[in-house]
Image (tube, rainbow, N blue to C red):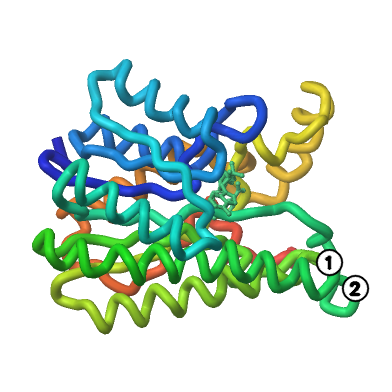
Amino acid sequence: MRMQNKVALVTGAALGYKSGGPSIGSEIAIKLASEGAKIVVVDILEQMGQKTVEVIRKKNGTAIFIKANVSQTKDVKNAIEITEEEFGNLHCLVNCAASYEGDIFKNVAEIPEEDWIRILDINLNGYFRFAKYAIPLILKSGGGTIINISSAAAFRVLKNFSIYPVTKAAINSLTRTIALDFAPHIRANTICPGFVRIANSEGNRSPEEIEDWIGKISKSYPLKRVCTVEEIANVALFLASSESSYINGECIIVDGGRNISDTHEF
Ligand SMILES: NC(=O)c1ccc[n+]([C@@H]2O[C@H](COP(=O)([O-])OP(=O)(O)OC[C@H]3O[C@@H](n4cnc5c(N)ncnc54)[C@H](O)[C@@H]3O)[C@@H](O)[C@H]2O)c1
């Protein structure tokens, strides 16, 4: 049990979006629980957040759900307070919550300013807020780890999707400043996934449309498939546990080799 006697808080850990299918945060929460961690599931979606708790409890794990909007300081502070009241300690923070809502599939000239600012406040400042208010409790608990879920989009951008890579590149820098300022007590690292199959992004597509869409995306990856949520959760477990005890301030790209590949052939 690699997370025995540890307490981990995972934001964005509701079990899938509307359909209840997999999400990266819920899979990380379930994986850390399976290794003995007591889990605080945080999300804005109450029903789906409770579902993650149910899955963990069914497997004899320990978990609670706290509803919080990462863009609201009072919610974030409240989540940390409840964590301390309930479990006494916090050893691991996984920042995963992100919003894809609004008119955000736009270039810089076209994206509405309010959407730019709102996404910045959830997807970047939400990570900052949870780190800010969790760090004192992690230090009080004897130290621990922070894992920020970033994206391969921090390195390679998609056309007409301007705000998302900006937040992810900033998350990588946020992680490094935490890693330096709070060493040796806290190790902070990012995971930068390529395309991961989750319930939320499948939207209203039919099963055939989904397979066709995923098949097309898979072709651009050297491993000829997209990533599973479990493959990200495995990396999160490694970074949360003492197996990664000398890794600090790093960014682990989990994209099946796409980032190192060029587009043309000789
Ligand atoms: N799926 C991918 O291909 C992929 C690739 C790279 C990085 N990521 C990153 O992984 C993380 C998890 O995303 P996912 O793909 O599992 O998507 P997801 O939509 O299933 O999960 C995001 C979660 O964040 C929650 N959330 C949104 N706004 C919130 C708020 N204001 N307060 C609290 N919770 C809020 C949502 O309810 C949802 O449960 C994100 O940071 C995302 O950017 C995903």
Residue 119 at x, y = what percent? 67, 65
Q: Amino acid at mark 2?
A: Glu
- Residue 153 against residue 16 in the figure, above or below: below
Q: Quadrant of the N terminus?
A: top left
> Is 21 situated above or below 172?
above
Q: Hey, what amino acid is under mark 1?
A: Asn
Badge 1: residue crowd in 10 Å (few <14, some 14–19, many ≥20)? some
Residue for badge 1: 160
- Image point 59% across, 62% down: which residue? 122
- Give the numbered dot on residue 110: 2
Viewer-side residue, 67 vs 241: 67
Q: Earlier in the sequence, mark 1 or mark 2?
A: 2
Tag in front: 1 or 2: 2
Under 8 Å from ligand 1: the CB of mark 1?
A: no
Q: Are marks 1 and 2 in contact (CB under 8 Å)?
A: yes
Q: Position of residue 248 (x, y in %)?
A: 27, 71
Task: Please tell me which residue is depicted at 36% across the width and 32% down the height of the picture.
Answer: 30
Image height check: is 10 above or below 23?
below
Q: For this view, does 261 lie left or right of residue 70? A: right
